[in-house]
Image: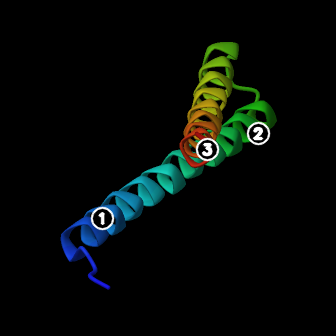
Amino acid sequence: MKIDWAALASVFGVSLVVTVALVGVFTLGVVALSKLSATAAGGASGGSAALARTGAYACFAACAAAVAYGIYLIVA
């Protein structure tokens, strides 16, 4: 049995980068939701609340799309 170490390292590297990026995007979504609750409690303008909500939804949608694409790659 022969192991292709270059391919294994490539898969490991891509998996590591995508995982860190996905966790970072999800974290941005959580931070945006916390800003949303902070602006609602502070009585800030509606524009910043809408921006925080839109940013959070965009981050969570990007995470869901990445997970769906990963599942598609596994199944296909």
Label 2: state its secondary structure.
Answer: helix
Lower position in the chain sequence, tag 1 or tag 3: 1
Would you name the residue on which mark 2 appears? 37
Furthest residue toward right = 41
Task: Count residues near mark 1 (Cα–Cα under 10 Å), then give few for <14, some for 14-19, many for 20+.
Answer: few
* Image coloring type: rainbow
Q: Does residue 7 appear to the left or right of 27 in the view shown?
A: left
In the image, what residue type sits under mark 1?
A: Gly
At a point 63% along the width and 30% down the height, the residue shown is 61
Q: Does residue 58 appear to the left or right of 12 in the view shown?
A: right
Which labelled disc corresponds to residue 13?
1
Which labelled disc corresponds to residue 67?
3
Q: Does the CB distance between marks 2 and 1 fall below 8 Å? A: no
The image position of residue 4, as x and y in percent, is 24, 73
Mark 3 and mark 2: Cα distance apart in space: 27 Å
Lower position in the chain sequence, tag 3 or tag 2: 2
Query: Is 15 above or below relative to 41?
Result: below
In the image, what residue type sits under mark 2?
A: Ser
In the image, what residue type sits under mark 3?
A: Val
Lower position in the chain sequence, tag 2 or tag 1: 1
Furthest residue toward left = 6
Label 3: state its secondary structure.
Answer: helix
